Amino acid sequence: MEVYIKILSAIYMERGSMHIQVQCCGIALMVVLLIFYLRQRRVSLKTERAFLRAFCVTMACIVFDILSIIVIAHKDELPSFLVELICKSYLVTLLGVAMGALSYVCVDVYVTKERYKKAVVKYEFSAIVGTLAIYILPIHYQFGEDGQTVLYSYGPSVLATYVFALALLVVTFYLMWKEKGKINPRRREAVRLWMGIWIGASLIQFFNNELLIVGYACSIGMVVLYLKLENPEMNLDRQTGLFNHGALVQYTKEFYKKEEGFSLLAIIFERSFHKNMRADTKGTAKMEMVEFLLKIPDAFVFKNTEDEVLLLFKNQDTAEEKMSQIFKRFEEGWGAEHDIYVRPYWLYMPDSKVVDNAEDMLYLMRYIRQNNNEFSENRFIYVDEKKASEMYQEKQTAQLLLDAMEKDWVEVYYQPIYSTKEQRFVSAEALVRIKDENGKIVPPGAFIDVAEKNGMILRLGEVVFEKVCRFVKENAVEQYGLQYIEVNLSVVQCAYEQLAEDYIRIMEKYGVDPDFINLEITESASMSAKKTLLNNMKNLIKYGISFSLDDFGTGQSNLNYIVDMPVDIVKFDRDMINAYFENGKAKYVMDAAMHMVHGMDLEIVSEGIETKEQYQTMEELGISYIQGYYFSKPLSERQFLEFIAASYKEAAN
């Protein structure tokens, strides 16, 4: 120990104590960083491996910096080739730090394993050329006035280090600029800070050679990377200690990039993970479950949402072997008394390759949960190619909807409604259609459900209503004897609190008489968010709009809907009309319904009338309005104007 202290003292006197102290601080910082890093559970991401490589070369840089100070200070006592080898090795580690930054960025830029290897090999070749130049070219040392104190090294070897390191840094910054869409924004920021600190220190040292601070700057750069990106705790859920959603996304992305498959088991709780343990007042059962999941061999466990835990297995056989053990354990109960039972739902995807990427994999899980009719019959759902195909179809439809609204591919068709009393067409129902990229009309049955499920129906409904108002205003359709246009409201729209405000704003924008608008609601709409619907109806009726009850005769039909809803018109569903002609008992039901509706002084529209016989029967029954293919299919704006103008002219004659 005494000898060690004497050596350090001598070095301090010969080189200046600040330099050794700074490098030792850098090593201490790196050691502390390594301890914190290794003591945490990690997901084994590609970026983590790149970070460890950068960490190792940075540690080597600082160590060789200290060694170079020592051997130069004792160069007269050591073989010259050893002094030169260590000093040049330090320069090579500086080149390694630059290469470490470049390869760290390449993880995001070159997504596939083959592209990554090809690119890194190309850059590593440049680094090897630089390494050879450093070892081949001469190096010199600058001493103090006493001829003994070594201040710094210089010469062609040092210059080569700066040139090649600068070249690698230029490539790094170029990639971050050119491929910024592929690189994690936090990674870009962290690498910029890391390299900024390192470049700043290098410039200071270049112009003030006696200030040896590059090695310490490298350690500061590692701290920046750790705090902003590579801290394993960032990938952990604080409440359970399981890997979190962010870690799940990163980890599964790497599998898809490498085109490697995996198996996934989702545990879906009926309530949140914690509420399922409400009876667990001491928290022992919850932690027992967490510890059980964490101890499953060959499985990575992620808390994806508050009510969903995902287990990822690299091997399908392993997954299916462990699944039976997991099911059995959940049946045994939790807690000290094994009296806390949790019965989750299970989703099992044996092969991740049924989807193309990590985003689609997570979307598929959400899609199945949203369409969870199977859960009522079976608590276990097998996720296969069929379900993935259904999900992709929905995604494609959702994208088509977005494109249609952004590119004005939404069209409104109109189906005329005939008045049996006035013997002419007095109104029409507005029906939404969209076009695909080839201009082909897509029927509503292909996209309405998707629009309602993902919330786009609000925007789509507003687009349709605005088109109707513009059509009414620009074409003055009242001149053809039309009294009103019917516009459908979806269940989601009826539950939207700003509906009345938005629709009134649109009508005022186009100066449309509210008497000319009739909004259709469905029975299911009146069941859901009834209070909101009634408030909207109250405000719109006060403004002058009327309402119809659409699709009467479907679902859970009952006359209470008509009693509760302030509607003026009841529309009998096509199925109800067909049943009237095909089923003797249905006639009595429809006769009674018509009698009661008429008794409440409401008008009736019969939908789906396709034959002359059906029309004559409905007319004899006293049905006020007829709608169906017997008169016309839904028509485009131009076709509808031509049809209604011709019909009006014919009726006038």
Image (tube, rainbow, N blue to C red):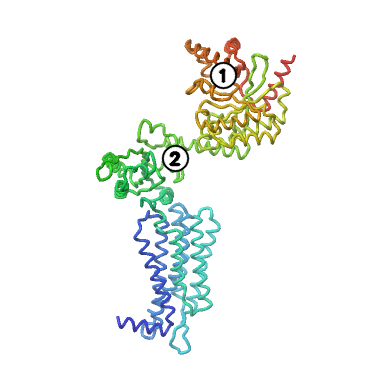
Instruction: Please name whichever residue, 253 or 120, is drawn nearer the observer in this view of the structure.
Output: 253
Percent position of residue 349, x then y: 37, 40
| Nearer to us in this view, 40 or 483 | 483
- In which quadrant of the rendered view does residue 653 lie? top right
Is 176 located above or below residue 585 in the figure?
A: below
Residue at mark 1 to residue at mark 2: CA–CA distance: 36 Å
Q: Tag 1: residue type?
A: Gly
At which x and y percent is residue 538?
Answer: 60, 30
Q: Amino acid at mark 2?
A: Arg
Q: How many marks?
A: 2
Kindly identify the residue that appears in the image at 65 percent across and 16 percent down. 419
Residue under the point 62% across and 23% down: 415
Q: Which residue is mark 1?
A: 608
Which SS class for mark 1? Answer: loop
User: Foreground residue, 365 or 321?
Assistant: 365
> Which residue in the rendered view is the most extreme toward the bottom?
146
Return the residue found at the far right: 653
- Drawn side of residue 530 relative to residue 414, left or right: left
**Residue at numbered disc 2:** 366
* Image side of residue 43 versus residue 547, left or right: left
Q: Residues within 10 Å of mark 2 (few under 14, many from 20)?
A: few
